[in-house]
Image (cartoon, rainbow, N blue to C red):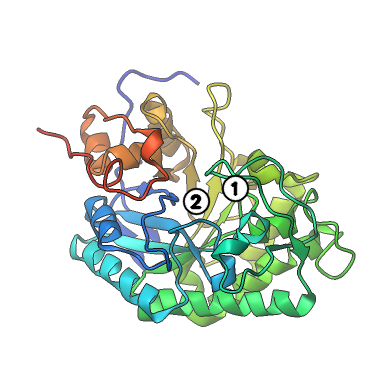
Amino acid sequence: MTIVAEPQINAISSPIDIGRAKLQHRVVLAPLTRLRSSEDGIPTNLQVEYYSQRASMGGLLLTECTAVSPTARGYPQGPGIYSNAQIEGWKKVTEAVHKKGAFIYLQLWHSGRTGKKALHPHQEQVVSASAITATGVDILGENFETPRALEITEIHEIVQDFRQAAINAVEKAGFDGVEIHTAFGYLLDQFINTSSNKRTDEYGGSIENRCRFTLQVTKAIVDAIGAEKTGIRVSPGGGAFHSATEEFPVKTCSYILSQLQKNWPLMSYVHFMQTRTPENIDLDDAAVYRSIWKGPVISSGFSSSLSMSHAIQHAEKTGDMIAFGRAFISNPDLPDRIMNNYPLSTFNYETFYTHEVQGYTDYSIYNK
C-alpha cells in the first residue's frame, strides 16, 4: 500500500454508532494496564485524572483490564469491579469522563494462569483450562505460576462473576458498556487456544467446546445488560502473548464471530488486537472475518508515531475505529492532534508499570 504524505482523515474523524453510544470520531483509547489503583484494586484519583484527560467530545475510552473477582487478579495495583469500594472508585472515573462528553467501557478480565496467588485473598492457586504453565515472564519480569485445571462447577461460577461484574460496571458504576477480554492468553483465551487447553470434557477438544466458556460469558452479560452495551476483544491465534497459540486460529475465531453474529448481532463491537511490526503494519487483521461479523470493528496495534499514517489509512480503507495505546499515553489530546496533524509526543516505556504520576498524567496537551 502506498502511504501518502498527508493522509486524509475523513473516516477517522467521522461519526459512528456503537450500541447506544453516538461517537463523533473513531479514535479510541485502547485498554492499557498501568497499575495505578490501590493495593485493594480500588481506582484512585490518579485514574480519574488520567481518563478525564483523554476524554473528548463523542470519543470512546476503553479501560485497563479489570478483575471480575478477588481470584481473577493478576497484577499488583490493578483494578477490580467486585467490591463496593471499587465500584465507588470507578464511579468517579465515569462521572469525570461523561462531564467531557465522552463514552467509556470497562474491560472485564480474569487472569487465569497469568495471575498471582499472592494477590488472592487466601493464596488460592491460579487456575486455567489445563494444568499447563505459561512460558516466559509477565510484565514485571516474573515467572508464571503453575495452574490447576478448573472444575466444571467453577467455570459456571466464573461465568456468574463476569455477569455480576457487568452489572456492577453499568448499573452501579455508570459505565456505558463493557468489553469482554477473551484475548492475549488470559483465562477465556486459555480455554480457546489448543496450546493451553487439553481438556477432554465439554470445554475441551473441538472448536465448539473450547469456545463454550467465552460464549457462555457473553450470553450471561448480554442477558444482564443488553447486547448494545457489550463488546468483545479477540486476538486470533494469540499473537504469542503468554505462550497462547492456536492450531486453527481462523477457524476458531470464525466460529466465535459466527455465533456472535447469529445470537447477538446488536453487540457494540468486536475489537481485534494485532501485534504490528514493520512487516505487517498494513495488515487488516479483521479482513478474513468481515463477511462473518457485520457489526462495528475496532482495530488496534498501531502503537507509535511512525505508524500513525498507517492507522489513519486503515480507518480510511475499512471504516474501523482505531484503538491507540502508547500514542494515547503520551498524547492525552490525541484525537485533536490527529484531526489537526499536530506532532506527537513520545512515550516513556520505563514508567508504564510504575505506580506514580510520572509517565501517566504528566504528559501535556499540544501548545497551539
Q: Secondary structure at mark 1?
A: loop
Q: CA separation, marks 1 and 2?
A: 9 Å
Residue 247: x and y, percent? Answer: 80, 44
Residue 148 occupies quadrant: bottom right
Residue 11: x and y, percent? Answer: 35, 41
Residue 167: mark in rendering: none
Please indicate whether residue 4 sits to the left or right of residue 286 in the image: left
Q: Amino acid at mark 2?
A: Val
Please indicate whether residue 10 sits to the left or right of residue 367 in the image: right
Say whether disc 1 or disc 2 marks the residue closer to the N-terminus. 1
Badge 2 density bin: few <14, some 14–19, many ≥20, Cα 10 Å: many
Q: Nearer the viewer, mark 1 or mark 2?
A: 2
Q: Are marks 1 and 2 in contact (CB under 8 Å)?
A: yes
Please indicate whether residue 145 sits to the left or right of residue 232 in the image: right
Residue 328: x and y, percent? Answer: 33, 41
The residue pinned by badge 2 equals 297
Q: Amino acid at mark 1?
A: Arg
* Residue in the foreground of this view, choosing between 180 and 271: 180
Badge 1 density bin: few <14, some 14–19, many ≥20, Cα 10 Å: some
Count of marks overlaid on the render: 2
- Figure quadrant of the C terminus: top left
Residue that sits furthest to the left in the current view: 368
Residue located 53% across and 43% down the image? 139
Let me know if residue 245 appears in the view.
yes
* Residue in the foreground of this view, choosing between 241 and 74: 74
Please indicate whether residue 41 sits to the left or right of residue 100 in the image: right
Q: Secondary structure at mark 2?
A: strand
* Residue 151 vertical position relative to residue 34 in the rendered view, above or below: below
Let me know if residue 69 appears in the view.
no
Residue 88: x and y, percent? Answer: 32, 76
The residue pinned by badge 1 equals 290
* Residue in the foreground of this view, choosing between 76 and 339: 76
